[in-house]
Amino acid sequence: MGPSPMVARAAGGCSSAALAFFGFRPLRRAVRPAAAFSWSQSSPYGGCRSRLAHSLVDSILDELRSRRRVRVSAKIGLQGTKELSDNKIDKRALQKGLLLEFQKDSERSLLAVVERPDGKKNWMVTDQNGILSSIKPQQVTYVVPGIMNFDSSRIDEFLKKAQDLLDPTVLECAWMELSEKDKSITVEEFAEIVYGNKESLESYCAHFLLSRDIVYFFKVESRDYSMYQPRSPPQVEELLRRKHAKEEAEKELEEFVHLLKSAKALPMESKPPKSSWLVDEKVRQKIEALQAYTVDACDDEQRRLAGNILKAMGFTRTSSAALKLLINVGYFPVHVNLDLFKYDVRITYTEEVLSAAEELLVDRPDSDMNIRKDLSTLKVYAIDVDEADELDDALSAIRLPDGRIKVWIHVADPTCLIKPRSIIDREAMHRGTSIFLPTATFPMFPERLAMNAMSLQQGKQCKSVSVSVTLHPDGSIAEYTLENSVIKPTYMLTYESATELLYMNLEEEEELRILQEAASIRAQWRRSQGSIDTAMIEPRIKVSNPDDPEPNINLYVEDQANPAMQLVSEMMILCGEAVAAFGADNNLPLPYRGHPQSNTAVSAFSHLPDGPARSFANISALRAAEMDYQKPVPHGVLGIPGYVQFTSPIRRYVDLLAHYQVKAFLRGDSPPYSAGDLEGMTFIASMHVKVARRLHSNSLRYWLLEYLRRQPKGRKYKALILKFVKDRMAALLLVEVGMQVTTIVSRGKVGDEVSVAVDTAHPRDDILSIREVIEDTDDTEE
């Protein structure tokens, strides 16, 4: 059969691709007669713009629709193709040898030949891949008309012939004709119009094009069979816009995947830096979608985009796969801290905040200049960890002529630079605290401000708030004063070097010995007031080159019972008690901290050995802390009548609030904040402090596991039994590591020491497996 009249007439107006599909060459416009299709330069829909003679389309459609819906074919003896090709296919319509299309899954439709029934409703079919499977009638999307006893081995040949006829551009041409008349059409009618006949191959191609079209036609179900209705021009225009946008997105995705594959193939030292992925906006959006996917913090669009990228790269759509990919391309280091992204931690400052900080560094205002007391002649000891960047407290002491001890706790004075409610103050509140990680420090204030202008520095005149306390011989407070001061720190000591000086008992360091004596009588007095010992062994890790695949890990195990640590701790508690007394005496709103006495008497754990085991039991029995903003509340754990954190205003925002209040009083001004104000701001800051603590805890554990992973297989560790969780499942303290773990032990009681070994340590998955090592004992005496 030759081409239909519509095909012949349409040939003059369709796009080149469509004309090639029809088997015609484009006619010259000068010699083309009154053609069915004509070009329009203003058409927004592509290459075809048609005006079909009314009589042509109408005559074809009227002729087709006048035929019976159910016909008997002399050749094949089947029901009419409309009934067979309709979605409403029942068991009687299917029979052996039919060629049909069925929905394999959400993304695939396959051609198959019906083999035999499978039970009451299903059918066994052999698909185009030669696979025999059972399908439900609901899966059938089309039955190819005019075919009986089709051999499944010929499906491939059928598909190749169909491929030659499948040109999507004919949809545009047909739509332009039919949309003007708002004509719906069946698959057979479409085949007749486009191909000139509705034989098996042509009908299948018409179905294929219409069923997969998302722009020009939409399916309308009728009671007897399916029709395809042309969409309105505005709808087509919008769908084309979406289609082109999708194609552009797919092109961008393809280019991005190429970038990823190129970077992935490079050796580690040659991979592009992280900053290079953030230059181009479209690349940045995709890399950030993957980053958000790693911590499940992405919106719907990022989730969709990241999923498509992972699929294109051959990865599973999981957060761990996204992490692996970003490490493979060099965007993330091997030991990236995902919590920084998960908790959306502020690790940088806005230009506005940095600019305000620089102005303070230049001007360095001091509204308390005229009321500062010169204490620069005192010997001043600043004691902290060796890598401390923010030094915000130091100590002095003398013995008075009457034999009593007077100590000074000097605290850095950041409020001489920053004011309440200023931009830098607001930024500090929304950080809550400085964050100290094994790999980095993120200060509460901009770095240059915190570590230079605010911090105490050895040998330099430093502004401070000095809390002086004279002690009774029993360790209780006899007198106290708070005043603005200027000091000149004499020593910057680590805990280790301070402890060494204490052991050396040097005559020229009499002030340090006096401080130790003051700490000792204070500890005795607090114990008499019911204080609870909570000193533990704690780990501290410093990673010097965290971006390397195998960075250097320096582990420090700190015993909080260390003499220098005990000295500093006692002086900080003394300062907090004095500030609380100052607030009470002057009716000053402050963030007062308290802690009710435990319901369990301290004597209940007296049978446990002194040290970590007893401290662990004491900590386990503690009740929740309390806050008050108008008056002090007893602190049962510390054994003092009131307490205010005051010694770390550079690191902790709540300490800074106390400084604002105290400094205003010392100047004779009204306090800037009411009790209600303090409560609200403390709540905001505390939320961020909780995140910072979780971040620190998780990071510390990660690097402890990495440290254990690197140790020789089978290495033995000393472990102290802290408590039994259930039966012989025990909580242990690895003495050489400072880490708490759990495992089953076969012997021993709380406070005893056992030997254990590490079976598995996997930091990224937070897996640690510990087993007890039974020591071989030789009871034979020589």
Image: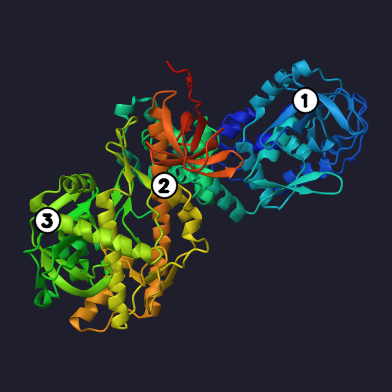
Amino acid, disc 3 = Glu
**Residue 401: percent from the left, percent from the top?**
10, 70
Left or right of 164, for residue 141:
right
Q: Residue furthest left?
A: 377
Of helix, strand and loop, which one carries label 2?
helix
Q: Is residue 323 above or below residue 566?
A: above
Residue located beneath label 1 in the image: 112
**Residue 609: percent from the left, percent from the top?**
43, 46
**Residue 682: percent from the left, percent from the top?**
39, 69
Q: Is residue 73 above or below residue 622?
A: above
Of helix, strand and loop, which one carries label 3?
helix
Q: Quadrant of residue 569?
A: bottom left
Cα separation between marks 1 and 2: 74 Å
Of residue 487 and residue 82, the one placed in the foreground of this image is 487
Q: Quadrant of residue 48?
A: top right
Among numbered discs 1 and 2, the one appearing first in the sequence: 1
Residue 510 tag number: 3
Q: Residue at x 37, y 65 (%)?
A: 528
Amino acid, disc 2 = Pro
Looking at the image, can residue 384 be seen? yes
* Circle 2 crowding by C-alpha within 10 Å: few under 14, some 14–19, many from 20: many
Amino acid, disc 1 = Ala
* Circle 1 crowding by C-alpha within 10 Å: few under 14, some 14–19, many from 20: many
Looking at the image, can residue 309 be seen? no
**Residue 481: percent from the left, percent from the top?**
20, 75
Among numbered discs 2 and 3, the one appearing first in the sequence: 3
Residue located beneath label 2 in the image: 612
Q: Residue at x 11, y 49 (%)?
A: 506
